[in-house]
């Protein structure tokens, strides 16, 4: 075997290694940009102290109704074949969910802020869990 044929496998490995390393570097460089975009689109967070008990109760009722709508639509979408029909069902569901939230005197932005904050504020989550349990018992 010549030295040229022996060096070709290493050349391929080196080329593949450079390509993988380049992909990793690009991924690390792109991550902060993606993270910044997500932060821009994420709703503002609220602290537990900023959410009164009656508002948390309204939120819990809204959330349970929104989840019920989402579950119903997911079941309906499972049998839909046409993309236009699926889009129409999703749009109707969004309208229903907005109507549920606004019908209880809460705007959608506030609902989304509280929902997002449940994942970052342990005290708010604890309070929510208690209120949600009360609301579920009252609706049984």
Image: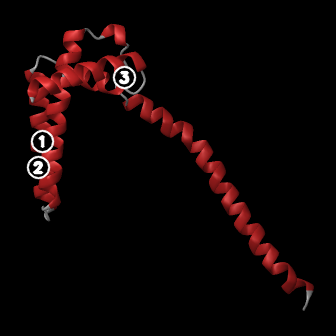
For disc 3, the marked residue is 117
Query: How far separated are the C-alphas under marks 1 and 3?
Result: 23 Å
Q: Please say if the residues under marks 2 and 1 sit with CB atoms less than 8 Å apart.
A: yes
Which mark lies nearer to you, 2 or 3?
Answer: 3
Query: How far separated are the C-alphas under marks 2 and 3?
Result: 28 Å
User: Quick one: quadrant of the N terminus?
Assistant: bottom right
**Badge 2: residue crowd in 10 Å (few <14, some 14–19, many ≥20):** some
Instruction: Where is residue 60? Give x, y as percent.
Output: 20, 24
Of helix, strand and loop, which one carries label 2? helix
**Badge 3: residue crowd in 10 Å (few <14, some 14–19, many ≥20):** some
Determine the residue positioned at 16% across, 27% down: 136
Q: Name which quarter of the figure residue 30 lies in.
A: top right
Q: Please say if the residues under marks 2 and 3 sit with CB atoms less than 8 Å apart.
A: no
Determine the residue positioned at 11% across, 49% down: 89
Residue 118 higher or lower than 83, as above or below = above
For disc 2, the marked residue is 89
| Image position of 16 (left or right of 105) | right
For disc 1, the marked residue is 93
Query: How far separated are the C-alphas under marks 2 and 1?
Result: 6 Å
Q: Please say if the residues under marks 1 and 3 sit with CB atoms less than 8 Å apart.
A: no
């Amino acid at each position: 075997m010549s030295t040229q044929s022996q060096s070709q496998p290493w050349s391929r490995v080196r080329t593949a290694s450079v390509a993988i390393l380049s992909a990793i570097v690009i991924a690390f460089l792109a991550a902060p940009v993606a993270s910044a975009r997500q932060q821009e689109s994420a709703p503002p967070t609220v602290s537990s102290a900023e959410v009164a008990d009656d508002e948390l109760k309204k939120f819990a009722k809204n959330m349970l109704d929104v989840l019920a709508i989402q579950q119903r639509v997911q079941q309906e979408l499972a049998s839909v074949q046409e993309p236009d029909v699926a889009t129409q069902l999703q749009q109707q569901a969004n309208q229903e969910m907005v109507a549920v939230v606004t019908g209880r005197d809460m705007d959608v932005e506030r609902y989304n802020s509280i929902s997002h904050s449940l994942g970052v504020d342990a005290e708010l989550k604890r309070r929510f869990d208690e209120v949600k349990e009360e609301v579920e018992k009252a609706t049984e």
